[in-house]
Every structure is written in structure tokens, then in C-alpha cells.
């Protein structure tokens, strides 16, 4: 039996980052992942790299270029003829991007001295793991600490069972080779909207069915209502308050039944994407045998040091629930490694940025205005539109707004909400400011380069007490 100080189950952004940091800190580390290619080789990087963040962004970027060339290039004086979207070529490029990055993670783990095993891990007891390899062989590893970073899988709903052909999940939506004429999506979360944007830009008529009455309820209302308006203008048919009750494939089409305002409705589509959230992937781990506690939905319960109910077994990333974001899992991986090494690992959950990669992008950090109201916090807001930024106008991309919420008493930044071009990058300034416990006045007094989109942050901070110059 091979002996390790730390065994990490899962090589997603939580697991592989934890493994590398553990190795940097001097531990002897093994990292196991069950995702393998046809040759039985580990496809490291988890959901994020293989079927999540990266492939979705590759397709979003390709289709964003297509959208620009098709509709906006002419406003820049660019005449384009013969433009065509070659979807198989687009998919090939996406797969190359993924392959390259998967290879990169293998090199990083190797360079760090982490032993990688391709296979499914299951607990034998609280410090022994059996790894079942694809070729039917197995091996046993013993570890002082075991970290579960097994991630998540799409949630299945009985009313629309994924058949991998007409009814698909996010993985299927990333792999389509033809543009469906009519595309249905269940769930208006980040994944549903990103997939809807990709295929709508390529020509699909997209209808999104969402059970909740409000659009993007976790975003600030100023941003979600602007997003609803812009995405609708782009052609997404966003139907709120619609609970899907059934989906049948008939004559090559999917008949989707849903209830809205007490009435039954039907919509017919060529493909249906089920994007109703993600649940923990704990299959085959034998958590019950060890009495590792999970919540009602199966997410592993951990304490403030990411330790499960069993001493020496920790869990990080999507499998623990909370914000199901790659960067949240990675930060937990680093913090846990540092705690195991006796250092002071810490994650500030108040400053985790959220991003939805539609165009314009949507990004936020901290509290929304409704959350401030609900908690009885006295606050001020400063809003600044992209329309008033010279750089946004020069780019021809001026939809959206910045909104900063500051504490009325202390002036601390409580939340920053952006919808606009490059919001995913712009939000980092707000994250650093909040992590550093800056005041809105600090943002107002910080020199921002001109012309730049980041000037919007500066102006929104000035707008908090009516000092914005360009509105
Ligand atoms: P995962 O990435 O799910 O990795 C877990 C790994 O554990 C997997 O590789 C799995 O094979 C392995 N595993 C599971 N069980 C076992 C076992 N028993 N033995 C061995 N190995 C096992 N997040 C963002 O922050 N930004 C985005 O833009 C973004 N876009 C997304 C787009 C899509 C379409 C999807 C589906 C998700 C997206 N996410 C995004 C979410 C992000 O992918 C996850 O939050 C992130 O991957 C979680 O990391 P993790 O390491 O916890 O788990
Ligand atoms: P997220 O968890 O952010 O990926 O979003 C998934 C969305 O799917 C949530 O907003 C849910 O309200 C929505 N949803 C879940 N089940 C259904 C259903 N049967 N019909 C329509 N929407 C649903």
C-alpha cells in the first residue's frame, strides 16, 4: 500500500490546487481523478476545465466574435461578406483549448511532485482509499489526511429526463455540432443564460423557462432588470414563473409542458437543455460507511476548517455546496493546505466575485441593495452608465451600468454590481477594494486611466454623493 501525507480525491479547481499547495508546503501528495479519456489517461481539471468554465467560455468567445462580425462590424466601417459559422471547427478549437489546459495541469502536478492516479476513489476506512482503474485493476493508498474535492454533477429532474440526444444537460449543450433551429432551456441561471447566448448568436431561436418569478434573483435588481432587457433585445425569449412539468420527444421534436399562472402551456423545440443547477458528486465514495455527514441535498457538511464529521477527512469545492464557483473551490484548496501545514488558511466568503459571461457580462461582489434593506443597513448608492464612458463609446459597446453600494455611516464598500463589457475583469478592482476594507471615498480618490472602462468605477464612487463628473 502506498503511503501519503495527503490524498486528494478529485482534480478539479478545488482538488488540483489543494494538491499543488500541499506539495509546495512539503507534504507527500496523491491526487486521484476518475475522469479518463479513451486511453484511460486522467482528464485533469474537473468540471471546470473539461465541461464547464473553459469550454463554455471558448464557445462564448467564438460566438461573440461571430456576433460582432455579423452585426456590429459595419458600424466600425468594416464590410464583411461570406461570413459563415463553421460549428464543427468551433468545437474543434474549443476541444484544443481544453486539451492544452488539461496537459498543463498534468505538468503542474508533475512539477510539484504530486502522484496522479486515474481511477475512481472509494473510502476503505478513514485513512485508506481504494482506486479502481478503468482497466479493472485497483490499488490502495493510505493517507494521514484525505481531502474530498469530488465536485458536482448536473441535477436531473424527472419531468425532463436527459436522453443525450434531444434532451441534454450542459455537457450536451457544449457539444452540439449543428445549430438547433429551436432551443429550449430549463433554468435561467448562469449556465442556462450562457448556453442560450452561445446558440442564439449562432441562429437558434432560444426560449428559456424559469420557475422563479424574478430574473437573476441573486443579482442586484438594477443589474438583473438591465440584463433582462438587454438579453431579451438580443432575442432570448425569457419566460419567468414557468415550471416545467413534462417533456416528451415526438417526431424528432421535444414537446415541453409548463405551468404559468395556473395555466398549462406547451412549447415545441428541437433540443432541450436541462440547466436547473448542480448537485454533489459523492457516488462510489462510500461516505455512509464512514458516517460522513451530508445535508438534505447530499452536500458534505464541513466546519470552519473544512473538516467533515470524521477527523482527518476534509472536503472543499462544489461537493460542500455554497457558491459553486471554480475560484471559491481553489481558494478553499489553498487555505486548507495551509491549515494542514499549521499555517493560518482563510477564505473571505464576503468577497467572492460572481460572474455570468453573457454579453454584456454581469459581475458582482458583496451585498445587493435588497440584502442591505433586509438587514436594516443604512446605505448610499452610486450608479454610473457605460453610455457616459468615452472608452465604451469608442468601442461601440456602451450598454450597462456600474453600481456601488456604500455604508451610509462608515462609508465601507458593501457591494459592487456591474453589467457591461468586460465586467468579469472590472469586478477585480472592487474585490481588492473590499478585501482591503477600503471606503467608497478611496475609489473616488483613486486615479483611473483615461480612457478606460474602469473609469466607470471611479465615477460610480463619485456618484455616491453626487460628485460624478460625466452625468
Ligand atoms: P469539479 O470541477 O467538479 O471536479 C471534481 C473532480 O472530482 C472531477 O474531475 C471528478 O471526475 C472527480 N471525482 C469525483 N468523484 C471522484 C471519485 N470518487 N474518484 C476520483 N475522482 C472523482 N464556475 C466559475 O467559477 N466560472 C465559470 O465561468 C463557470 N462556468 C461553468 C460552466 C458550466 C457549463 C458548468 C457546468 C460549470 C461552470 N462553473 C463555473 C462551475 C465550476 O465548473 C465548478 O464550480 C468547479 O468546477 C468546481 O470545482 P471542484 O474542484 O469543486 O469540482
Ligand atoms: P442555477 O442553480 O443558478 O444554475 O439555476 C437553475 C435554475 O433552474 C434556478 O433558477 C431554478 O429556479 C430553475 N429551475 C429548477 N427546476 C425548474 C423547473 N422544473 N422548471 C423551470 N425552472 C426550474
Image (cartoon, rainbow, N blue to C red):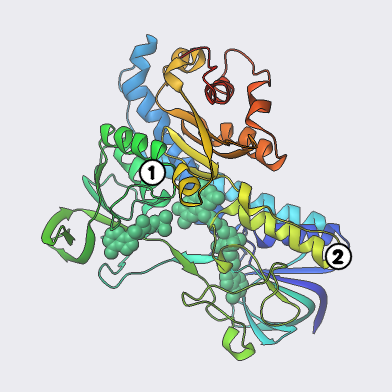
Q: Residue most toward the bottom?
A: 289
131 versus 335 height, above or below: below
Nearer the observer, disc 2 or disc 1? 2
**In the drawing, does residue 271 fall left or right of residue 278?**
left
SS type, badge 2? loop
> From mark 2 to mark 1, how far is it between C-alphas?
47 Å
Residue at 73% in and 68% down: 305
What residue is disc 1 on?
88
Corner quadrant of residue 231: top left
Estimate the x, y position of residue 112 in percent, counting from the top left: 81, 57
Looking at the image, the residue that sits furthest to the top is 77
Q: Quadrant of residue 317?
A: bottom right
Quarter location, residue 243: bottom left
Residue labelled with disc 2: 341
Viewer-closest of 379 and 261: 379
Say whether residue 34 is visible: no
Can you say whether 48 is above or below 424 in the image?
A: below
x and y, in percent, of residue 383 in the image:
47, 27
Characterize the local packing of mark 1: few (<14), some (14-19) or many (20 or more) Cα atoms within 10 angstroms.
few
Label 1: state its secondary structure: helix
Amino acid at each position: 500500500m502506498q503511503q501519503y501525507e495527503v490524498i486528494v480525491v478529485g482534480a478539479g479547481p478545488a482538488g488540483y490546487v489543494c494538491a499543488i499547495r500541499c506539495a509546495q508546503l512539503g507534504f507527500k501528495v496523491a491526487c486521484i481523478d476518475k475522469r479518463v479519456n479513451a486511453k484511460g489517461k486522467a482528464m485533469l481539471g474537473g468540471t471546470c476545465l473539461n465541461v464547464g468554465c473553459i469550454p463554455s467560455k471558448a464557445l462564448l468567445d467564438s460566438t461573440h466574435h461571430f456576433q460582432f462580425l455579423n452585426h456590429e462590424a459595419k458600424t466600425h466601417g468594416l464590410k464583411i461578406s461570406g461570413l459563415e459559422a463553421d460549428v464543427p471547427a468551433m468545437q474543434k478549437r474549443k476541444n484544443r483549448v481544453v486539451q492544452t489546459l488539461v496537459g498543463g495541469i498534468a505538468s503542474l502536478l508533475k512539477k510539484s511532485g504530486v502522484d496522479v492516479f486515474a481511477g475512481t476513489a472509494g473510502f476503505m476506512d478513514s485513512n485508506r482509499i481504494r482506486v479502481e482503474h478503468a482497466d479493472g485493476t485497483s490499488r490502495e493508498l493510505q493517507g494521514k489526511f484525505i481531502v474530498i474535492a469530488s465536485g458536482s454533477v448536473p441535477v436531473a429532474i424527472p419531468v425532463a429526463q436527459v436522453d443525450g440526444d434531444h434532451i441534454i444537460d450542459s455537457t450536451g449543450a457544449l457539444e452540439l455540432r449543428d445549430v438547433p433551429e429551436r432551443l429550449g432551456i430549463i433554468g435561467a441561471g448562469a449556465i442556462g443564460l450562457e448556453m442560450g447566448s452561445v446558440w442564439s448568436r449562432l441562429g437558434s431561436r432560444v426560449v428559456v423557462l424559469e420557475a422563479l418569478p424574478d430574473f437573476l434573483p441573486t443579482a442586484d435588481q438594477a443589474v438583473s432588470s438591465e440584463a433582462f432587457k438587454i438579453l431579451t433585445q438580443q432575442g432570448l425569449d425569457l419566460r419567468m414563473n414557468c415550471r416545467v412539468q413534462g417533456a416528451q420527444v415526438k417526431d424528432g421534436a421535444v414537446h415541453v409542458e409548463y405551468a404559468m399562472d395556473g395555466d398549462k402551456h406547451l412549447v415545441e423545440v428541437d433540443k432541450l437543455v436541462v440547466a436547473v443547477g448542480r448537485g454533489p458528486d459523492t457516488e462510489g465514495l462510500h461516505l455512509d460507511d464512514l458516517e460522513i455527514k451530508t445535508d438534505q441535498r447530499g452536500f458534505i457538511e464541513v466546519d470552519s476548517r473544512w473538516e467533515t464529521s470524521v477527523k482527518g477527512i476534509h472536503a472543499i469545492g462544489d461537493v460542500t455546496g455554497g457558491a459553486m464557483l471554480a475560484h471559491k473551490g481553489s481558494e478553499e484548496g489553498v487555505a486548507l493546505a495551509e491549515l494542514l501545514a499549521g499555517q493560518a488558511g482563510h477564505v473571505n466568503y464576503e468577497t467572492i466575485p460572481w460572474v455570468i459571461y453573457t454579453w454584456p457580462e454581469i459581475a458582482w461582489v458583496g451585498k445587493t441593495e435588497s440584502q442591505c434593506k433586509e438587514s436594516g443597513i443604512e446605505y448610499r448608492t452610486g450608479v454610473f452608465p457605460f453610455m457616459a464612458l468615452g472608452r465604451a463609446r469608442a468601442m461601440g459597446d456602451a450598454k450597462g451600468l456600474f453600481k456601488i453600494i456604500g455604508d451610509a455611516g462608515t462609508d465601507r464598500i458593501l457591494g459592487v454590481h456591474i453589467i457591461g463589457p468586460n465586467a468579469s475583469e472590472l469586478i477585480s478592482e472592487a474585490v481588492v477594494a473590499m478585501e482591503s476594507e477600503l471606503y467608497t471615498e478611496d475609489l473616488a480618490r483613486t486615479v483611473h486611466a483615461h480612457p478606460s472602462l474602469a473609469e466607470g468605477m471611479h465615477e460610480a464612487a463619485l456618484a455616491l454623493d453626487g460628485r460624478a463628473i460625466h452625468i
